[in-house]
Image: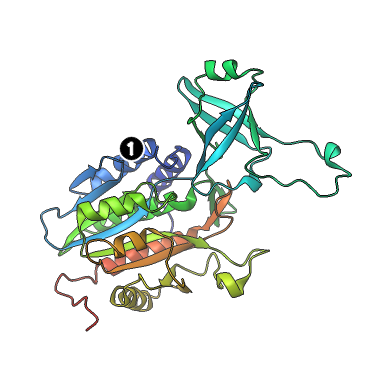
Amino acid sequence: MKFKNKSLQFLEKYLNTASPTGYEHNGQKVWMDYINPYVDKVEFDHYGTCYGIINPEAEFKVVIEAHADEISWYVNYITDDGLIYVIRNGGSDQMIAPSKIVNIHGEKGIVKGVFGWPAIHTRIGAEKETTPKLDNIFIDCGKKKKKEVEDLGVFVGTMITYPDEFFELNDRYFVCRALDNRIGGFMIAEVARLLKKKKKNLPFGLYITNSVQEEVGLYGADMIADTIKPNIAIVTDVTHDTSTPMIEKKKEGDLKCGDGPVIYFAPSIHHIIRNLIVETAKENKIPFQRAASSRATGTDTDAFAHSNGGVPSALISLPLRYMHTTVEMVSKKDVANVIDLIYETLLQIKPEMNLKYH
């Protein structure tokens, strides 16, 4: 599948717009503007979850969902010398922080800063190499006093993101920070575009949902599931490509970018919906991989599945390299196949289908 220029322009703009957990609104505006022509109406809740609806009057409701937020940092403490210590907003990785440029989202606008780190020369001879930890990583924004930092509009609670932007690698991969999981928002938006382009009339209401606050506990999905009250939910998120060094396949499974979407097996995954996805993939010759989670998937699938007395839910994941870094990487071929798999699965769903095991 070759992506249209308009689609790629949307993906680039969407990824390059900072949308940290709890502050997703700028990215959500980009997403809503793109999806608006392909749906009958667009809605959003008090915390910023957005959803486009096709057939809003239909009683039977199907959700396809991704999450919009990206990991980030909060300013936690400013020293008298003007250095900034941080806490996580989501699963930010302190190991990658040293020497990274950051955007500090101050009250007066973006303030540039850097995660400082002592030079290698000053660390040689230490009994044990110092590793980055939350209590020793710090941001230097070029100011010498706490008041100078605050004069920039930077205070405790100010949000911090990485500025790394989207690019394509060797015509095979998309690379950016926050592909987890704005690539999911892109894929469900493309499903809406395909439905419109091919003039498909669905026999149910489709809720294309871009949830907030997944990275801190699936909260956005938990809230919106109670609002929409769907009959079926199909969630898409990223999962680990385990073919790169230092990952134990016996623990993490055997998954690889380029080998297709990943269909998950877990207690919260509804057998009938999952089997429908598997059979749809086979019938349409869409390559796929399988993965298992022993307790929870750790994705918004769990929030939907456990809402409203139990919503039949399934998870289609996208293999991704280097999760929660600024160089997250996904296969363009896999992205196209996830879009196709969600699209083809929707065409197989009927409101009268039996969703009970017994």
Which quadrant of the figure contains the C terminus? Answer: bottom left
What is the x, y in percent for residue 126?
85, 45
SS of the residue under disc 1: helix
> Relative to 282, does residue 240 appear above or below in the rendering?
above
Q: Is residue 24 left or right of residue 233?
A: right
Query: Which is more toward the observer, 337 or 179?
Result: 179
Q: Quadrant of residue 248?
A: bottom right
Query: Which is more toward the observer, 195 or 229?
Result: 229
Q: What residue lies at 11% left-to-right and 61% top-to-bottom?
A: 59
Q: How is the image coloured?
A: rainbow
Q: Is residue 337 visible?
A: no
Three-letter amino acid code at the position of disc 1: Lys
Q: Disc 1 designates what residue?
A: 29
Q: What residue lies at 77% left-to-right and 36% top-to-bottom?
A: 118
What is the x, y in percent for residue 41?
18, 45
Q: Is residue 271 left or right of residue 179?
A: left
Furthest toward the right, the residue is 125
Q: What residue lies at 43% left-to-right and 40% top-to-bottom?
A: 19
Query: Which is more toward the observer, 215 or 244?
Result: 215
What is the x, y in percent for residue 267?
37, 73
Dot 1, crowdedness within 10 Å: few (<14), some or many (≥20)?
some
> Relative to 273, does residue 202 appear above or below in the rendering?
above
